[in-house]
Amino acid sequence: MIEKMDLASQVCNGAALRKASRRVTQLYDSVLAPCGLGVAQRVLMVHISRLKKPTISELARDLALDRSTLGRNLKLLERDRYIELVRDEQDARNKRVLLTRDGQAKLQHSDLLWCKAQSQFELAYGKKRAAELRTAMAELFSDTFWNTFEQARRSV
């Protein structure tokens, strides 16, 4: 059953997206809780693992985050010894992010729980609709959409 939407979510794309994002985060966090990671931490660790020792700038760009927000999130993972920040061998001004052994183990431990959260989401929302939603979200966080939005902003 779909509940009546509040006025802000009916007329503001930003409000609706933020509200949906918070709710999905709550759902995934509740399933991931036994491993001690939230979905935001897990996403960071997945990107670090996939990019294989990215610079902070590369990671920020890949996640569509500003460096200061990313830095705050990385500090928590560093505190828990899941990541390590090391100087870039080619450019000492840059730092690279790598998963520690503890981080790799924690990420692996979270995999089954993430699969469970993903399955529960798709069961509740529908597998096809979930795939369509991911496609729509990918379009929204793409550079193409960013550039189109900027052009629209200048023309208004």
Image: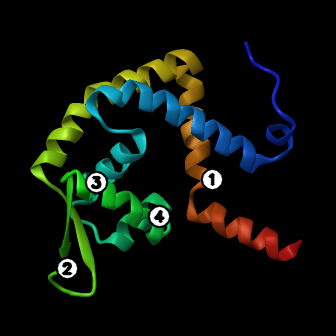
Viewer-nearest of labels 1 and 3?
Answer: 3
Q: Amino acid at mark 1?
A: Leu
> Dot 3: few (<14), some (14–19), or many (≥20) neighbours within 10 Å?
some
Q: Residue furthest front?
A: 79
Q: Which residue is mark 4?
A: 69
Q: What SS does tag 2 mark?
A: loop
**Residue at point 66% right, 70% down?**
147
Q: Which residue is mark 1?
A: 140
Q: Which residue is mark 3?
A: 77
Disc 1 versus disc 2: distance between alpha carbons? 32 Å
Quadrant position of residue 77: bottom left
**First in sequence: mark 1 or mark 3?**
3
Q: Is residue 138 above or below residue 120?
A: below
Viewer-nearest of labels 3 and 2?
Answer: 3
Residue 27, numbered label: none
102 left or right, relative to 126: left
Q: Amino acid at mark 4?
A: Thr
- Whether tag 4 and tag 2 are in contact, CB under 8 A, the answer is no
Q: Which residue is mark 2?
A: 88
**Residue at point 50% right, 21% down?**
122
23 left or right, relative to 5: left
